[in-house]
Image: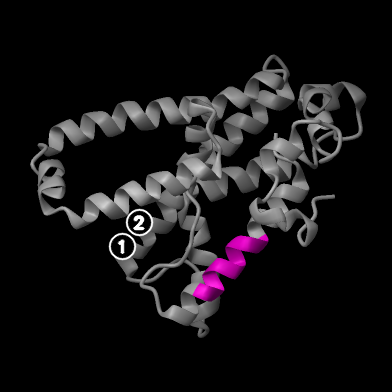
Amino acid sequence: MIPPSIISRGIGWQGISILIDSFFGTANGTSVSVENVGLLALTHVGSRRVVQISAGFMIFFAILGKFGALFASIPLPIFAGMYCIFFAYVGACGLSFLQFCNLNSFRTKFILGFAFFMGISVPQYFNEYTAVAGYGPVHTGARWFNDMINVPFSSKPFVAGLVAYFLDNTIETHNNTVRKDRGYHWWDKFRSFKKDARSEEFYSLPFNLNKFFPAV
């Protein structure tokens, strides 16, 4: 588990990146991908050096038209098959984090089932409503407010995560047995940056930037 201070630091740097993107007028802002969480669990590779080298390869090969033509010549059914296998494996790796919870508990099964159901049904309703009416279910005079509500609730991961988070933190949270069912006996040791000796190795910033952006 990533310490909360590291997550906060990452979100802060992402905000700075989006601000810099807006200054340079880029067509797309810096964003995160839900699939990357499962990909990280699958490969066990989270090094920034690997990402930097991969980005260098992509920039280099993007210059070579023959290399791009090679990928463009691959038939779409092959791409579709690869995506089916890849995303199934990545999704399964993401679900593997549930091994630390008690899946025999009715509370856990209810939260998982209800979150999955709402994560599928609510975005489907928002998307179908928008396709028929031309605007989302939330339709007021303020377009910014409409987008702020309609866009997140059209996302399946957002709705499922929001429902699961709300239920998991409101249903019998103070019971010691429930705390163990939620997997806290495993995750607690990773909540603090200094409790694990490997945190410094895994999450330290390059160029001695930890001095200016310390993790607490």
Per the image, label 2 sits on a secondary structure element best described as helix
Secondary structure mainly formed by the magenta segment: helix
Residue 135 part of the magenta-drawn span: no
Q: Is residue 171 above or below residue 209?
A: above
Furthest toward the top, the residue is 104
Q: Left or right of 83: which side holds 170? A: right
Q: Which mark is residue 131?
A: 1
**Mark 1 and mark 2 in contact (Cβ < 8 Å)?**
yes
Label 1 element class: helix
Amino acid type of the residue tagged 1 in the rendering: Ala
Q: Quadrant of residue 134?
A: bottom left
Q: Which residue is mark 2?
A: 128
In the displayed structure, does residue 157 sit left or right of residue 111? left
Q: Residue at x 39, y 68 (%)?
A: 28
Q: Nearer the viewer, residue 183 or 104?
A: 183
Q: Residues within 10 Å of mark 1 (few under 14, many from 20)?
A: few
Pinpoint residue 43: horizontal percent, then vertical percent: 48, 28
